[in-house]
Amino acid sequence: MNKVNAKDLSAEELYNVFSEIVKMGKEYSLSIEICAEELPVEELGLKKAQCVDGDLINELKREKGFRNNIKYKKDKNKRKECGCVQSVDVGMFNTCRHFCIYCYANHGRNSIVKTYKNMM
């Protein structure tokens, strides 16, 4: 996060940022969801989200004809506020070419380029 000069925000500053995001979402008719935030953001109109959502997984399975629902356990390796359920990442590091500097799955632009050169 040092690369983007990130800093911790106070609760008031976070509320201000989230309020502006909610306004933008309404302007463009978007539902805004937020992950792993301990502030009660629902009062601003934000929804709590999970990247790996057990309820959604069960819903998608039902749509495909599976009858059994699984009670997924919270992923204990995530932050306390994170709502993700346990999962296994089947992706490959250093393959996404969006080059987001905050991404945990890439070690930098050069690593991604090297991965693709080796794949050719």
Image (cartoon, helix red, strand yellow):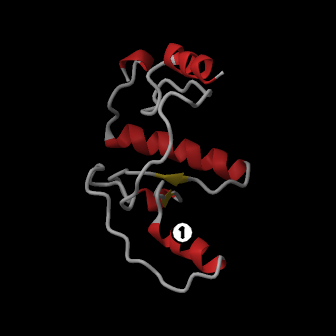
Q: Which residue is mark 1?
A: 56
Task: Say which of 59 and 117 sits in front.
Answer: 117
Residue at 36% across, 60% down: 86
In terms of secondary structure, where does tag 1 sit?
Answer: helix
Q: Residue lying furthest top in this view? A: 110
In the image, is residue 34 above or below residue 107? below
Task: Say which of 33 and 63 sits in front.
Answer: 63
Q: Residue lying furthest right in this view? A: 28
Q: Residue lying furthest bottom in this view? A: 67
Task: Say which of 36 and 95 sits in front.
Answer: 95
Task: Say which of 79 and 34 sits in front.
Answer: 79
Residue at 72% across, 55% down: 29
On screen, residue 66 versus residue 9, left or right, reads: right
Residue 18 locus on image (x, y percent)? 49, 45
Residue at 65% across, 77% down: 63
Residue 15 locus on image (x, y percent)? 43, 45
The crowding category of the residue bearing disc 1, from other C-alpha atoms within 10 Å (few below 14, some 14 to 19, many at least 20), is few
In the image, is residue 19 above or below residue 108? below
Quarter occupied by residue 84: bottom left
Residue 51 locus on image (x, y percent)? 48, 54
Exactly how many numbered labels are in the figure? 1
Residue at 53% across, 59% down: 45
On screen, residue 73 versus residue 120, left or right, reads: left
Residue 113 locus on image (x, y percent)? 58, 17
Q: If the image is split into quadrants, where does the N terminus sit? A: top left
In the image, is residue 63 above or below residue 19? below
On screen, residue 45 versus residue 1, left or right, reads: right
Q: If the image is split into quadrants, where does the C terminus sit? A: top right
- Name the amino acid, label 1: Leu
